[in-house]
Image (cartoon, rainbow, N blue to C red):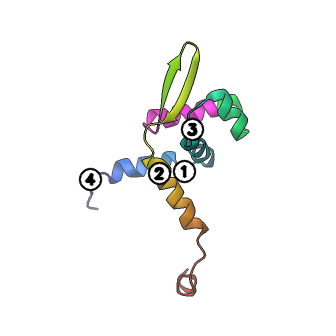
Amino acid sequence: MKHEDGLEATAALFKVLGSESRLYLVRLLAEEPATVGVLTTRSGMSQPLVSQHLRVLRQVGIVTVSRSGREAEYQLADHHIAHVIDDAIAHVLEEPSDDEGARR
């Protein structure tokens, strides 16, 4: 198979985003930067689970963290990823036209 520049990295990105929980955390951070405590409250996930997902998102460069004393605030590294997720959600929520429905 011929490889195109960026496909391998893009596949790795989509693999990380293959978690509904991580998608939700990214959506929350697209609204505003937040601490683990705030994300735990807003998401309904446990603190260890939120921290684990944030660690994965940091490792691939989707989120960054800034510290002030003992407090750590997470934010999106850039908002391109939020637009990708928004577009994907819009796509899956679209009603298929009659032609598309027949091909599925």
Which amino acid, mark 2?
A: Phe
The secondary element bearing badge 1 is classed as loop
The spot of residue 81 in percent (x, y) is 46, 48
Residue 84 location in percent, x, y? 47, 54
SS of the residue at dot 4? loop
Question: Is 8 covered by the magenta stretch?
Answer: no
Residue shown at 46%/39% (left/top)?
A: 62
Residue picked out by circle 1: 18
Q: From the image, tell me which residue sits under label 3.
A: 32
Q: CA distance from mark 4 to mark 3?
A: 32 Å
Q: Magenta span: helix, strand or loop, mainly?
A: helix
Determine whether label 1 and label 2 are within 8 Å by CB. yes
Q: Which residue is mark 4?
A: 5
Amino acid carrying label 3: it is Glu
Range shown magenta: 50-63
Crowd band around label 1 with a 10 angstrom C-alpha radius: few (<14), some (14–19), many (20+):
few
